[in-house]
Image: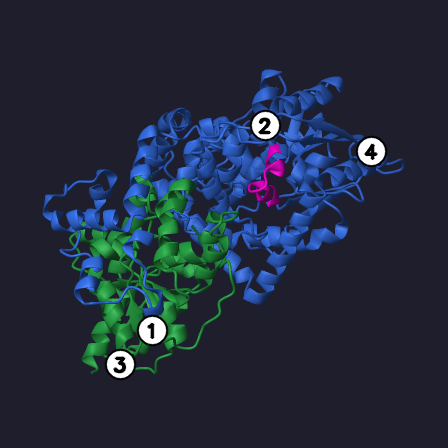
Chain colours: A blue, B green
Amino acid sequence: MTVHNYDPALIAVQVDNDEKAFADLRQRHFKARAKMSLENEQLRGSFLGATDFLQAKRRAVFPDTDELEQLRDRGEAIRQQSLAQLPDLLETLEKNLTANGIQVHWAETAEQACAQVHSILAMNNARTVVKGKSMVSEEIELNHYLEKQGIECLESDMGEYLVQLAKEMPSHIIMPAIHKTTAQIARLMHTRAERSDGQSVSYTEDVDELIGNARAILRDKFASADAGISGVNMAIANTGTLCLVENEGNGRMSTTAPPIHIAITGIEKVVADLADVPDLLSLLTRSATGQNISTYFNMISSPRRGGELDGPEQVHLVLVDNGRSRMFNHPQLKPTLQCIRCGACMNHCPVYARIGGHAYGSTYPGPIGQVVTPQMQGLDKQGELVSACTLNGACGDACPVRIPLPKLIRELRHEANSTAPASELDIPGKGSQRHLGEALIWKGWALAHQYGPLYRSITWVLTRGRKLLPHHLGAWTATRTLPVPAKYSLHDLARGAGIGEQPANRRLNEGEA
Amino acid sequence: MTSSPALPRVYPPKPSQVYLMGTCLVDSFDPQAGMDAIQFLQHHGIEVLFPQQQSCCGQPAFNSGFDDEARQVARQQLKAFVADIPVVVMMGSCAAMLHCDYARLFEGQPEEAQANALAARTFEFTEFVDRVLCLPPSPASGERVVLHTSCSARRSMGVAECHQRVLQNSGVEVIEPNRVSECCGFGGTFALKQGDISAAMACDKAEAVAACGVDTLVSADCGCLMNIGGTLAKQGRPIKTRHIASLLRQRQEESL
């Protein structure tokens, strides 16, 4: 057994402190959360290292740029076609799932979705649940809801399990515990993991041993749980099939070992046909983790049939809207729903790499989180997220289904500052980020730049008065020197050098401007 | 704002006249770069026109979500660069605003056709030098520079290679810092609105630039140069910043 840094007196305190630190982080606004993350050197190192590693993996698995671009074209086309016929596909999906013996439930809101899951569990007297990884269940805060109803809901994905033990939320949609060090994980397992015999897990920082310990605990739970809950990566309308991508086998266990399986998905995850699957699957696994294919790919098409030896007796699918219909109906923001949840945008985002997932304060962090979360929770609650982007475009370049993420973020900034009256189709909190001071600055800025003579006068004052300008400019000068205007502007220099203004046959006069 | 170029690039034969769009940052903070560009192009037999009516492309307001204000300012540029001749832009991000984003800004507006026509004849400075001037290579000068390519130049305009080629062609040895394609953290108003994150990004970038061991940082984007250069200066690192146009003009004069 490998043992490092083991101090029995300190260890529980450290785990409690980590929990308190996370609870404290959640209380704060985005800027404060980002600042806390930036000041945490261990966290910065972890995220930068992880995103560098994942970028390199993705590059290595797409050696041929042309092939990648062709695959992205197809991925984008499949997602756009699916969305174009979304209402029809959902109807077909329901029909075919039902014909296959899978029970379909529709939830308009997060609360409805939680209540539906609870009522399925309650009807079957289910008290213990094992879960495969599901971002939608994080989105609707299902664990929290079920816990309040006295139902134990154990995460079985290793990362999700650790995050659950730590009473945190995932900091990445593919690697939920990416922010934790081995020592932190060792402490968590030692103090909070429960073996079936009631004993605590011995302290170890050996990764294989840690995984072995978690596996032993989860095995018991798989065997005894009353129900299993999973996410869905793709739902196939024409065959009534639920597809599930995973690497740990826990998804397969959660969906087959317990007598009841409840799958949860956003309504956008439906595609028409099995023929749509290979390209999307290839894009998903290669973009997410650099794998050509995931270790497990589950296709669930019915509950246990007569004569079959295993599989659940009931399979349910909860289709969650939670704001997706509104996105579907918004002409500019509809591409949000193309997302296949691979995480490539966050892996390529220089902001995410520096502040990490928890700073976003949302289930979905990084660029896709900046687009999805304000649309789900409202610009009034999560509007600050849209300013956390330099519009550098790395996410848009990385997205395997070509979601124009920078364009969507810019569009959301426009919505956040809009003065147009809100309609039913608008994002909640439209215009809520508009501050009078900033609006006035832009009005003044526009005035200064839309009349040639006025602009030149202002530039004249700025250049001639450059010695009088302040030497400090808020956040800028904390880490940078202030740029000083030149003595003469380019307008002055060009005029002085006799540079012409318009071609000889198209002279404009000042009055036209 | 980054997005795929709105229009496929068509490079004209070398024209007799071009407009120069100085951009508001070059205008006030590095006007010599503008004059260097003018003289560089003049030396190659091109008449350069500089409309005094020009101001800013409108991108700061557009990227902040203030479309009406961006449009008011952008209209002024439509008027300033009215003749059907190429517009050479001194910064990648402003070139990207005209080439990629005016289409969205003027969608359904009376100026839509005019904006699309302007987009088609807009070229970033190094793009114009590389793809339109097509100059023969000069002998090596022994000068070494670190090159920073802005995200707009790299992703929206797709001209990172043009930066590289025009510098190499002029006889300069180009060194690329680590994480060359990563944003420096300027992002216009991002640097003010999310000052802490921006500072962290700029510090990492400055570190990578300094690690190259070269005393000149070049770029064709004044925003990035101010951000990285300002950070280097605050850290007391003796690395000067230059617009690529100034370096090309210097090489041209040296080889005369």
Q: Amino acid at mark 2?
A: Glu
Label 1's element? helix
Q: Which mark is residue B140?
A: 3
Q: In this rendering, does residue A80 appear at all?
A: yes
Q: Nearer the viewer, mark 3 or mark 1?
A: 1
Label 4's element? helix
Question: Which residue occupies the foreground of this view, A139 or A171?
Answer: A139
Chain ID of residue with mark 2: A
Q: Are marks 3 and 4 on the same chain?
A: no
Q: Disc 1 designates what residue?
A: B166
Label 2's element? loop
Q: Amino acid at mark 4?
A: Thr
Magenta region = A326-338
Q: In this rendering, does residue A388 appear at all?
A: no
Up the image or down, A126 lies above or below A372; here it is above
Q: Are marks 1 and 4 on the same chain?
A: no
Q: Are marks 3 and 1 on the same chain?
A: yes
Q: Amino acid at mark 1?
A: Val
- The CA span between labels 1 and 2 is 53 Å
Chain ID of residue with mark 3: B
Q: Which mark is residue A424?
A: 2
Q: Position of residue A28 (x, y in %)?
A: 38, 26
